[in-house]
Image (cartoon, coloured by chain):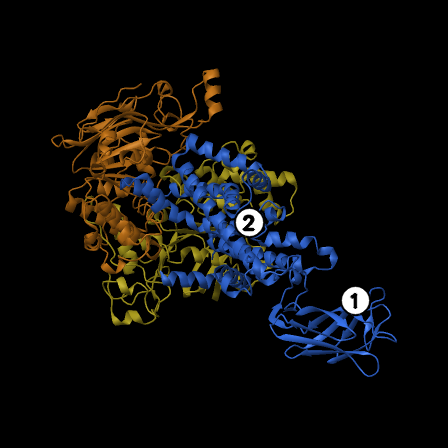
Amino acid sequence: MNARIAAFFREFSESRIALVSLGITLFFVACTVLAPFISPINPYDLRSIRLSDARLPPGTQQVEPVPELSIPLAARDGKARAEGVTPAGDPIVLQLVPDSDGRLALEIDARNMVVTEIRLRGLPIDASVQGARKHPIRSEWTLANPASTLHIETGPQIPANLQFSVLIKGESEGTGMTFLLGTDGYGRDMLSAIIYGIRISMIVGAAGALGAMAIGTFLGLIAAWFGGRVDSFIMRLVDFQLSIPSLMVGLLVLTMLGKGVDRIILAIILIQWTYFARTTRSVALAELRKDYVDAARCLRFSALRINLLHILPNCLPPLLVILTISIAGAITLEASLSFLGVGLPLTQPSLGMLIANGYEYMFSNMHWIAIYPGLVLLVMIVAINVVGDRLRDMFNPQLKR
Amino acid sequence: MSEPCANPQPSKPETLLEVEKLNTWFFTRKGVVKSVRDVSFHVEKGEVLSVVGESGSGKSVTGLSILRLIDQPGRIVSGAIRFNGTDLATLSEEEMRSYRGNRIAMIFQNPMMTLNPVQRIGDQMAEAISEHEDLPQSEVMRRCIEALKAVGIPSPEERMKAYPHEFSGGMRQRIVIATALVTQPDLIIADEPTTALDVTIQAQIIHQTRKLIDETGAGMIWVSHDLATVSELADRVVVMYAGAVMEIGTTAEIIGSPRHPYTQQLLNSVPSRNEPGKELFQIPGMMPSLLSLGEGCAFASRCSARRPACDQPIPPEHLSATHTVWCVRAKEEGDAA
Amino acid sequence: MTRVETIIPANKHAEPILSIRNLSKVFPLQSGFWDGVIGRMTGLEPKAVHAVDNVSLDVRAGETIGIVGESGCGKSTLARILAGISQANGGQFLYRGRDIQDYLKNPRDALKIQMIFQDPQSSLNPRLQVIDIVGEAPVVHGIIPRSQKKDYVLGYLEKVGLGAEFLYRYPHQFSGGQRQRIGIARALAVNPELLICDESVAALDVSVQAQIINLFMKIKAEFGLTMLFISHDLGVIRHLCDRVVVMYLGRVVEVAPTERLFSDPRHPYTQMLLEGMPKISLERRKFLSIEGEIPSPINPPQGCHFHPRCAFRTEHCSQKRPDLVSLEEGRHIACLNWQGTSPPPIKSGGGYAQSENA
């Protein structure tokens, strides 16, 4: 059996592009299985998402929010002292004293915090702060990279009562996280979202296609075995189903049942069982004409045994081809439905949903939000289809030499 | 028993086709399958040469090789196929096409392989002519009707408008033969043309074929596994086994006094040559794999009279002008097996 | 409906193991809903193929019966009915005195009738190993416990001339002759009484055919089998069978002990068949008397199906269906003017015992 598998694989790899596609497909399968371990963050965990990270371009480093604190000062005759605590928990002491030149000197003692910016708000409008830029309208002075002592000029006389606030901004630190593919409109890391999207898409596609295969194969075998009216009934059902566009069926089912992974799988099964039923019926009819089925009948096996243990295994090769192509079809279908907004809930974004989310930013020059999941979807579907086509070629005896 | 062999035909025979040391091998994943090994024979005008063998003997591949219809992974490795003096093996594909279906016609086992199911048979036959010759329409029609008459199809003028599915299996095979005849070929290669047909129909076709060859003077290679039909139709017989020729002779020599152990034993294992109800004579063992053949006689592994010399290349023994045997003991014993 | 006389087998003393009376099998050609409606409205009889048309036959235990005919004669349909794979539309089919449908209800009983198929390529399930092909039925039907499967299968493989090395191989790894042996082992493994062989050596090469025919004779003796041998090859039939049934377009035209049939064929069709049978001989035959095509079974000629090809036909041949009548002990013929066809215009000879090399 191992030799057979080896020979099968050797034949498969005669087509380079199929081999590459198989590699890509297996990579996506690995993504599906290992998503929690390889994705940088868990995009479903809403706590890990910061709206402040929204719409960052690819390659942006994630940074912590800038530590800042505001300390009010109330000075009497130019003297005041106030204390505050930085977000990191270090004490900051502010001291205001008039100096010899008739100015006020503000000493900032921030031991463990690198102060990158200081804003003074509420000073008299005619005051001036050395080295600071004044807001054109408001009474707000901004100093970048200030020295530890500021000098404030309040005119010829120091006001007896002076009330203002000091806003101290510290240096922001990187979190060590890089958004390789940028972030989406909700501040989710696109790479993680895509990996989880692959996972959802693959699970939905595989579960849908496998479910469709189970049901379709079962009905196809029944149609072939019993023939006559049973056959006619099942096949007319297939014809009826095929006459409705598959997206319509999906929309119908999902609008009736609501969103959810289970429901979209159900929709896919309802759409795709027909292909399996048709193929199984035609292959099984060909197998039924073969002598080994008559031999099995002659050995008085039950119909169930003949169908499941004798006919079905011989129908599998073409069904596997349909299965691969159906998985790709199911993924497309799920993406389309999600894109249309009836597929998965917003909290579990699939690739289609990601594309839909990115679509609104397409014209704001934030292409990455839609392009990357789109590319992944494209590569995934092409790769699976190429694998399916290669299998089809291999199972087609007319192309064999 | 071997009589001094007189020439079977009164007039001096003309050689139509000469196959010399033909080797057709298939280069498969498992190895080189030497389907045809050093096969040599010739066909004369107006004679039916039958190539007889079991499956895997290389008889069909020999027929296809003459028309150069060997597909990948197979190819003609060496040898000459001289048809009226031209070596077909050296021709370009373009030149070969002017021979195929024209000077040399081919008939296959399944008539539906040759007949186009959606074309009227008259049109198909006319196409076969116009592909190679530029003739006025009336002349083309006349030839088609003549050919259909020759193979015994009643009211050919009307039947030409029919589609292949309107005919029975035997009729279809007749039409295929008629299509092959329509270009007035010098050589017809028929590969198991009656195997799929019923006994009574088979007899009719053999009868027609014999008549046609006698009338037209064309040569024919009749590839078959059926010794009985061969004995009724052929002038000379080539016996093949595992890709090599075992024995060549006139039908009388092969059927009447075979000298190769394989021919003898094959004839003896036919039920009608055994007493009913008694155990049939059977050749023990199986045909060896064509992948692992030695230099010697391919039949040696099943031969009861095997000797060391059988593992060496076997030189042909010419027992008469027409009878040649590839067996080391052909000369020694008058009657074997 | 024509009454068909009972065919008395050669050996009158043995109990018939299988007995069929007026057995018919009709395949409707139009079976759709609208066909039915149209048929009822127009009152026309729906088109159908009478694949087996009023066939009666008794088979005694231990006999080997040959059924001969050309394509469309219904011999394979008959084989499938007798094997219990297909069901007849009309007539009676008794096996060991019990109605076949009743008999088939018990699978252990039903295993007594087994079949060997024509095409060794398709008669073995390509996805099963030999051990399962042969051993599945005995285990499923409780003939042996699963633990004994290997030894049991091996025993039967040896009986058909195959060794232990074949146990775990797949059918594609075998030659045609070996596959046919596996098919025989599969049938034997369920202890059958009646073996139906449908063209079982037709697809084999001459040398392999001889081996398989010998195997059939060996197992028949060893297992005490009754055999029904269906073939178009008269040489094989002549070699193996005690009695021969000749069929033409669904009907039996002649029944006779083998030697009598070959030495003195009575029905014009049998004569034509024997004449057309290719023989290994050095004489050139005259084929002139063989004429006409086998008619389509969908639209067979009226009266005697054979009359358009018959050299002895008279007017009433196209009107009346000939009954199968007893000619002499063990011989039956369905011909309206059978007296006219005797003696046969055929040379017997050129056949067996021409053993100039043997």
Q: Give the amino acid at mark 2.
A: Gly
Task: Residue B214: tell me if it is visible.
Answer: no
Residues B301 and A277: in front is A277
- Location of residue A217 with respect to A161 vertically, above or below: above
Which image quadrant: the C terminus of chain C?
A: bottom left
Q: Colour of chain A?
A: blue
**For residue A152, what is the image quadrant?**
bottom right
Residues B118 and C258: in front is B118
Q: Provide the secondary structure element on which disc 2 rests.
A: helix
Residues B60 and A213: in front is A213
Q: Which chain is rendered yellow in the image?
A: B
Residue B285 picture location, percent across and down: 26, 59
Q: Is residue B130 left or right of residue B300?
A: right
Q: CA distance from mark 1 to mark 2?
A: 64 Å
**For residue C220, what is the image quadrant?**
top left
Residues B287 and A364: in front is A364
Residue C52 picture location, percent across and down: 33, 29
